[in-house]
Structures are given as C-alpha cells and as structure tokens.
Amino acid sequence: MGSYTPSGPECDLLITNGVIVSASDLIYPPASDIAIKNGKILCIGSLQGLFSAQKVVDADGAYVTPGGVDTHVHLDQHINGALGDNFENGTRSAIAGGTTSVITFAFQQKTEESVLPVVEAYHKKAAGLSYCDYSFHMILTNPTKTIVEEELPILVEQGITSVKLYMTYDPIKLRDRQILDIMLATRALGMTTMIHAENSDMIDLVIEQLYAQKKGDPYYHAISRPKVAEDEATYRAISLAQLMDTPILLVHISSAVAAAHIRKAQTKLLPIHAETCPQYLYLLKDGLRASEHDPFSGAKCVCSPPLRDSQADLDALWEGIANGTFTTVSSDHCPFSYNHPLGKQLGMATGESRFTDIPNGLPGVETRVPLLYKGVQDGKITIQKYVEVASTNPARLYGLSTKGTIAAGYDADLCVWYPDAKFESFELQNDMLNHSIDYTPFEGVKFGNWPRYTISRGQVVWDRDGGGVVGTKSHGKFVKRIKNGLKQPRGRFENEWIPEYKGRIPAKPAAAAPELAKAKEATAAGGVGVVNGV
C-alpha cells in the first residue's frame, strides 16, 4: 500500500489496477479503479489523477471481489458442548479468509418463553468484540403463540429478518404443525425461514440399532444419518412451504437427491432457496474413519448432515452451484476443539466411543472463501458464480442491503486477491489459520490463492503480507437487515384456502441505507454515482 496525492477531491482509499468482479460482469483496468470515502464506495472508473488518496492499494491485475458474506456461522453458542469460537476469535478468523460480514445465531433454549432476552444476550456477547460486521438469525425451538404473533414483528423492527428451524435433534426439533404456524408468520412479515431438514425418526431408529450392534465409533455417525433421511425431510419441507407459499432456505444440503428435489421445486417457480457448504464439496465420510495413530480421530469430521460417500456426491453439489440450484454457499462454522474435554472428546467421556455424544460441527469460516475460489481455479464454477454465491446472493437473500456488491453507495467491503500466476501455492496447515481451534478438516488441501487484502467499510483489516490481521475487534458493528431481496411469495395457493396471519405487521419495514438510495438516484439521473458530497 502507498499514498497518492494528485490534485482533486480526497478519498480515504483508492484501489487501482484490479479486475472488479460482480455476479454478472468483469470490469478491467483502467476503468476499474475504486474510490472509497467514509466507509462507502464513492465511485468506480478510470480515476487516477482525479482523486487524492490517503492510501492506495495496487491490485496488480488481480481480481477484486466483494467481501465474503457468510450467513451460517455459530459463535459463542453452547450446543452439546463448549463451542470453540466466540465473536472475537471467529470474526478474526473470518476477515483472514476474506469475509467481511457474518450472520450468527441467537439460540432460543427450549425452556425460554420469550426470544427478546435471547437476542439481547447475544448483542452483549458480540458488542465490542467483532472484527467484521454481523447480524443474527433467530433459532426458534419453543414457538409459542406470543412469540409467533407478537415477538417476531419486534425482531423485524430490530432488523432481524430470518429464523432457523430444526426438523431433527431432540429436544429442539419442531413438529410439522409448528413449522407451518411459523411459516404463516414469516410469510406475512417478509422473513426468511431457514430449515435444517433431516428425518428425525429415521435417524433415531438407525442410532438405536447401531448401538445395539456395539457400533459407536465416529464413522457410524455418517451411517446413522443416511442420505434418504435428508432427501425425505427436504421434500417435506418444500411441501410445507408450497402449502403456505412461504420462501424458505434449506441449509447445508449434502445429498444429490435432496438437491434434485430443490431444483424441481425451483422449476415450478416455488420460492425455494438452498445452501451448501465447502465440507460437502471437498470432504468424504472416509474422513470419519480411525487413523493409524488415533482411533477417535474421525470425530474431527463429525457434522450434520454427515459427509457423504463418493466423488460423485461432491461433483453433484458443484453442479448444483453452477446451475443455480444453490443460492448460497456458507461455512456452517460450528467449531469444537478436538482435544478439549468439552469439545470433541465428549464422545469419549464414558471411556468408550459414543458418536452421538460428539459435538456436531466443523471450523470453516476462514477457509470458505478460499475453497470456493479454488473451485474457480479448478474449473468447477466461474469467478462470477463465486461472487454470486459467496457474497451477492447471501446479502440479497438476508436483507443486507449495502453488502455483497461493488457499486457506488455500497459499503466498501472488498477482497483483493493475488494474481494467480504470481501466487506461490501451499498446503494448508492448522497453524496458518487464525481461529482458536486445534485442527482444521481441510489440513493438507492445496491452495492456489488466498485473500491478499480484506477491506471492511473502507478499512484494511487483513494484510497477508503486512502483518496479517491489522483490524481491531471493535471495528465490527451490528447491521439491521431488511426483507428478503430475492424470491417473494407467489400469491398462489393450493386451493381456495388462503392462510390468514393474526399477528401484527410492522407499520414501517426497514428500508435501504440512505447513502445507497442517494447513489441510485444519482445513477438514475445520469451521474456517476458519487455520494457523500464528493
């Protein structure tokens, strides 16, 4: 980085000589300079000589992409064990991997009869400890009438416009009727409904049989959650959404058949979105087998849904990204240290391996963006598709109205890469990462690029060649979100019955940031989209 001081109006940061990537286009030098002021993108074009800049980043001909938007991240959350990352550790890891916004989960315990104190508690957990911007999804496990009709509208007013529901896991799973009641509300309120789809009864039966056969090693976690359990629950969740005409997102899809169910629903123009994760693009269930030196090592790869069988499974999901079946690719970062007694070792607490006692989840917020970029280098997806599923779609789906796009008026959240030809590839080792976890499931994966700079609201927070993490843990702020900006209810129902929501509808739904509105007005008037008075 350097300074640049010709005559002209001043900006805080000028990025030059990069190739700007959007979800649809590439902009090449010299028309791809980016001027940034007060945390916002001021304008884009051939700008050298037009601005004086406090700092200049020469992208050296490399890609400049929107900062990653990871919308499935678990931080400081106690679920079947002590979660390894809090907001400080997790968001530090995020920016080191090119992610500039995360949406984490506020988790309602089954015994809690109000979600408002839950959200307040998570605000306290995050305050002053986040390296990047953040928001919350609300996990509903006890959807009382009061919560559904009175408190969900309050969450929308507070900028929380999504809920997550589970069809599996005792005691937090919901019955179909409970899911339908929630869908009735979320449809009316413009909230996105996220669903973890696995058939709980199928899984319970297989687990019971496996333990009766003395099969408790980590590998049997994958056997206990067969693809058909995900396939059936996915189809059922789609059917519930079809009845209610409610937009849903099916999280962490791992099965090709489940993806096919989703694709078929999308061809019917149903408002169905889907997410997959890098672990289902790169890892297989053989990773759950015992290693030569550690019979319990497979616990490192225990997640739900489990890792699947073959390269054909991985290829089917890559194809689902390429053809648009998957709206987003998230990390599902849910890390537990391997050697901690309240981490993965809980599966050995009785002295023998019990896979159901192993906390489910993997670290991945730092590796998500580089692994997706690796898919570009390997020819599986285009660089535009990478931007679409890693940044633009997540921001639009979850109402992050100033994120996920490189355009005037948007937050200056950017990732500057290295030129591929100049990057020295490396095999990943856990000590290279910035999380607080003692392993990575992607150990040994060869990377041909990594974010050189991560820029959050105009601040360089990650400089790989100049100190690593250079941002501060007080930089990140809570972002209020607006309604789903992608698929909306169709206004079509299965028959003459039309559902009626009895709860309150917020009078004034959240709107886009005023700076963004100003930029759009300027563009519509034929200007260059310059904002903030410059």
Image (cartoon, rainbow, N blue to C red):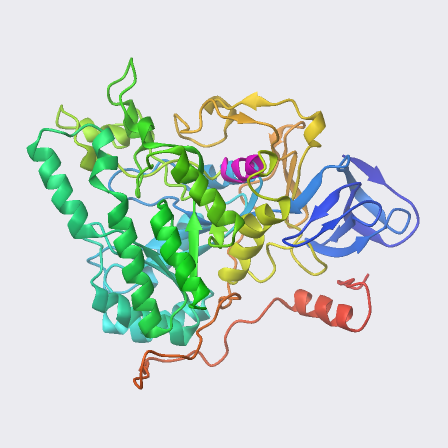
Q: Closest to the observer: 241 or 13?
A: 241
Check the image and report above or below for 258 versus 312. Answer: below
Q: Position of residue 334 (x, y in %)?
A: 37, 41
Q: Residue at x 71, y 27 (%)?
A: 421
Prevailing secondary structure class for the magenta stretch in the rendered image: helix
Q: Position of residue 493 (x, y in %)?
A: 36, 79
Which residue is most to the right? 7
The span picked out in magenta is: 366-375
Q: Closest to the observer: 494 or 58?
A: 494
Check the image and report above or below for 230 versus 528. Answer: above
Left or right: where does residue 63 sit relative to residue 148?
Answer: right
Left or right: where does residue 461 sit relative to residue 174?
Answer: right
Residue 65 location, quadrant = top right
Residue 358 location, quadrant = top left
Which residue is most to the left? 212
Point out the image quarter for the C terminus: bottom right
Q: Residue at x 57, y 43 (%)?
A: 381
Question: Residue 346 colored magenta?
Answer: no
